[in-house]
Amino acid sequence: MAENIIFYGSSIALAAIGLLIALTRRNLIKIIIGLDLMETGVNMFLISIGYRRGGTAPIFDIPLSKAVDPVPQALVLTAIVIGVAVTALALTFAVRIHEKYGTLDISKLREMKW
């Protein structure tokens, strides 16, 4: 039970650090990194929900009391794939914005007239 609290606490701390970075930074790349840290924290939290000490994969003839929950693992695997695609798209947008406007500072980008 204590290791679950450590997992929960570290995942919540990682998500909070990512949120803090995403809200306080002005550089688009740093904001994207903050969003990735938040995503990692949420993924860690979901995996820790399905964790069972001494558990094994729920295949063949294993009693359910010794099996881990496979649903959070499947959800996190899907979330990782989607997160990589979203990160690649966001970085592509950041590169294009830098090529067109010469800056990644969101306060300067807001001042520009579209």
Image: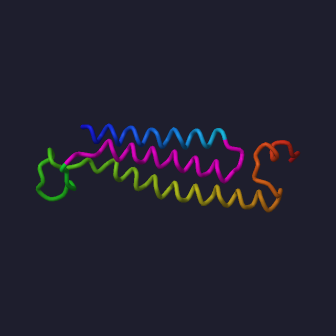
Q: Is residue 49 magenta?
A: yes
Residue bounds of the magenta highlight: 25-53
Q: Residue at 57%, 47% (x, y): give it.
A: 35
Which quadrant is the N terminus positioned in?
top left
Of residues 91 and 22, which is closer to you in this image? 22
Question: From the viewer's perspective, is 38 left or right of 23?
Answer: left
Question: From the viewer's perspective, is 38 left or right of 48?
Answer: right
Q: Residue at 50%, 55% (x, y): give it.
A: 82
Vertical side of 78 occupied by 49: above or below: above
The colouring scheme, among rainbow, by chain, secondary structure or one colour, is rainbow
Q: Position of residue 5 (x, y in %)?
A: 32, 37
Q: Is residue 46 magenta?
A: yes
Q: Residue at 60%, 60% (x, y): give it.
A: 88
Q: How many marks?
A: 0
Q: Residue at 40%, 56% (x, y): give it.
A: 77
Question: From the viewer's perspective, is 67 left or right of 98?
Answer: left
Image-quadrant location for residue 98: bottom right
Q: Position of residue 16 (x, y in %)?
A: 51, 38
Q: Position of residue 29 (x, y in %)?
A: 66, 54
Of residues 86 and 14, which is closer to you in this image? 14
Residue most extreme to the right: 113
Is the magenta region chiefly helix, strand or loop?
helix
